Amino acid sequence: MIVLLLLISYCFAGNGVNVKNQLLLMPYPTTVNAQFGSNNCVEATSNIKMVLSNNCQNDPNCLSFMTFNFNHTITYPLQRQRNLEDFRVSIFAPIDIEEMKGNVVYSANTVNIELTGNNIEEIYPPLKIGIDESYSLDVTKEGIKISATTVYGARLGLETLIQMLRPYQGKYIIKHIPIMIEDKPRLQWRGLMIDVARNSFSRSAFVKIINAMAAIKANVLHIHLSDAQTFMFESKEYPELSKKGAFFQNKVLTQSFIKQLVQYGAKRGIIVYPEIDTPAHTASWNAGYPGVVADIWDYIVSSSMRYGENVLALNPANEKTFSIIDALMKEMGEVFGNDYVHFGGDEVWTGAWSKAKEYPAILEWMNKKGINTLKELEAYFNKYAQEQIIKNGKTPVCWEEVYQKGSADKKTIVQVWNNVNLLKEAATAGYKVILSAGYYLDMEMPLCSDYVADSCTNPNHMWVWTNRDMYRNDPIKELDYATKQNVLGGEACSWDESVDEQNFFDRVFQRFSAVAERFWSSEDITDPESHEVRANYVRCLGLRRNFLKGTGPLYHSYCQLPEDI
């Protein structure tokens, strides 16, 4: 019976065998050199302190950034784990992870952090895609040292370090020393999109999402602010959009809160950028400004169109429509303050105009503008939004249809979400590209046909294996070197029709951990069983750090938690 249990455990789940001669780190670093098999270890307590190089210590902003992140990433988690038992995956020693006991050869009282940039501008640059996020982490009998060019790299080194400090008898142990880690991201853009227009989130949930992303080395949070169902962005110029277009005003993202969120994200190395979808997915605009959306409700109701509200599109003949687009593209750029504004452009159905009550007026407006077809009208909307964003000094981001239909500006970043072949096509054509195809977290498996349940049905498919499917999905790996230079990275998407903050972390972060490793780690790191064990441990650590509450285990494991969880 025991043999059978061992076989079942080994076949169905990652276990200690799968992480033999690996550190329990996720995402896994680029290079790890450790004395596996050695019992030598470093011991630390929750009182461990940070020692900064003078070039950062003497700059108030740099010191503040590093102090905040050291307290958040090291001090607070260690205090919460005092007297807890270590994470385990099995009661059977042959397939359990290695116990953290050994010969203590050094007691580490400090973490020495050396910032190697030539000046403070290099050490603490503005947070942008493409900044240096590399770091090295050495744990030897002489102590613990992190080296990085920038504070962002140093912060990521701290995230690796907290995963290494495992509890043992009231203290923390790092085994297999000496350990030398060299690490850098595979992809510059490592994002997560959340859809707050289908189901809203509290302000505290956003903070936890950023903390969870920071822990697994993601660096971009894309907020889908509006859709057919609600409009969740506070516009000062057109305030009725959210006043009439949201169920609850206390869930609307006010401009003051957004600025605070962006600032908090920057402290954690996370760029926060907005999307307001146009010209489709805009039904909610009409609640505040009647007439700016073409009316096809009679057709939707009479035809019993599924998800029909999503297809409603902006009415070009209404005098307010383009003024609202102008205002929103400008306000989003100003309030979020970073380089990117996403204007949508997906799933435009020309019937949203041809079947509208306003169709005669739309045709008259098109005739005045020299627009001959509804496809040209779609392109007009897309080009107009891009022009406004570029005029305001920002970089447009769009869904793949804008490129596919020939209306993407060369300055626009193309987000490939459905047709994975467009990844190579757009990148080869010289566009910067983000990959989301195969990383839809509302789907059971990668690359299911949109809205077609049968394409995703597999009665033998256990939920735990969906994490492995996400992990194995890596079309970027197949591109040649030149094409890869135009792939900024990837973004997992959480479309939240059936998700709110009550189940968000369980639905999203189980599998986002797989995507995060795919975005960060070398393309040669491909073992899903190993990832499963390491991600399960990081999930346990996230619970102890109090930002992954609600996230279930990837498979059987033991994770002792503080009493206040």
Image: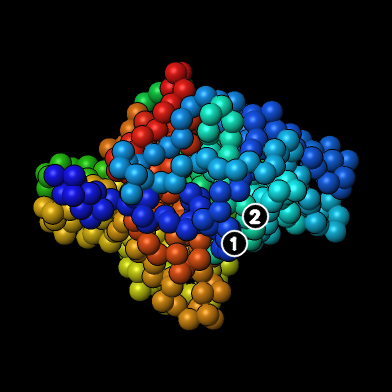
Q: Is residue 113 above or below residue 419?
A: above
Q: Is residue 232 above or below residue 138?
A: above
Given residues 542 and 78, the one toward you in this image is: 78
- Residue 347 percent coordinates (x, y): 32, 57
Q: Secondary structure at mark 1?
A: strand
Nearer-N-terminus badge (1/2): 1
Q: Amino acid at mark 1?
A: Asn
Given residues 193 and 290, the one toward you in this image is: 193
Label 2 belongs to which residue?
Answer: 178
The image quarter in which residue 116 lies = bottom right
- Residue 164 percent coordinates (x, y): 56, 44
Q: In the drawing, what numbered circle is on residue 336?
A: none
Q: Residue at x 84, y 37 (%)?
A: 60
Left or right, residue 58 beside residue 311: right
Left or right, residue 470 beside residue 74: left
Bin the neighbour count of mark 2 within 10 Å (Cα to Cα): few under 14, some 14-19, many 20 and up: many
Left or right, residue 330 beside residue 557: right
Q: Residue at x 51, y 47 (%)?
A: 216
Q: Amino acid at mark 2?
A: Pro
Q: In the drawing, what numbered circle is on residue 33?
A: 1
Q: Can residue 327 be spotted in the picture?
A: no
Give the colour scheme of this rendering. rainbow
Given residues 288 and 24, the one toward you in this image is: 24
- Residue 559 percent coordinates (x, y): 39, 33
Q: Is residue 293 above or below residue 373?
A: above
Q: Residue at x 33, y 33 (%)?
A: 503
In the orientation shown, which residue stands out farthest toward the front? 103
- Residue 232 percent coordinates (x, y): 45, 34
Q: Residue at x 22, y 60 (%)?
A: 449
Q: Can residue 479 be spotted in the picture?
A: yes
**Spatial distance from mark 1 to mark 2, Cα to Cα?**
8 Å
Q: Of the residues tagged 1 and 2, which is closer to the observer?
A: 2
